[in-house]
Image (cartoon, rainbow, N blue to C red):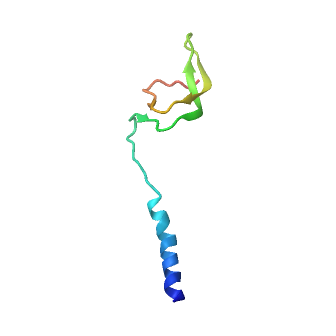
């Protein structure tokens, strides 16, 4: 009786993680909508004079994240 319980235990142990991984492919350049707020995100911001400065901000749930459209904002 111990052997079937042992085998069942191993089967459950090895099968449990199989359903825990999901990969979603997002095509390059496609916008994504934030599912939850991203706190203290590092961002680049253009000031009124056109100068680019680094900053931090919270990105609220529901906002869209988009790739840079060819314009390099990095200093």
Q: For this rendering, which residue is in front, 43 or 15?
A: 15
Residue 69 rendering spot, x and y as whole percentages: 42, 26
Judge whether 55 appears above or below 35 on screen: above
View extreme (front): residue: 1
Q: Position of residue 2 (x, y in %)?
A: 54, 87
Which residue lies at the image location 51% right of the left edge and 82% below the top edge? Answer: 5
Q: Is residue 21 above or below residue 8?
A: above
Residue shown at the point (62%, 25%) measured from the top left: 55
Residue at 56% x, 10% y is 49
The residue lying toward the viewer, choosing from 49 and 20, is 20
Q: Is residue 45 left or right of residue 35?
A: right
When asked about the image quadrant of residue 47, the answer is: top right
Residue 73 falls left or right of residue 33 = right
Dividing the image into 4 quarters, which one contains the C terminus? top right
Please state if 63 lies on the left or on the right of 38 as rendered.
left
Labels in figure, total:
0
Indicate the position of residue 16 as horizontal and vertical percent values.
Answer: 48, 66
Q: Residue furthest bottom?
A: 1
In the rendering, at what x and y percent does residue 43 appear? 57, 28
Question: Which residue is at 41% across, 48% downward?
Answer: 24
Q: Most extreme residue toward the top, as rendered?
A: 49
């Amino acid at each position: 009786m111990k052997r079937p319980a042992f085998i069942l235990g191993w089967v459950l142990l090895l099968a449990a993680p199989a359903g825990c991984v999901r990969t979603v492919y997002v095509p390059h350049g496609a916008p994504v909508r934030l599912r939850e707020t991203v706190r203290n995100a590092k961002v680049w911001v253009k000031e009124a004079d056109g100068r680019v400065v680094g900053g931090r901000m919270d990105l609220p749930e529901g906002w869209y994240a988009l790739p840079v459209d060819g314009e390099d904002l990095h200093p």
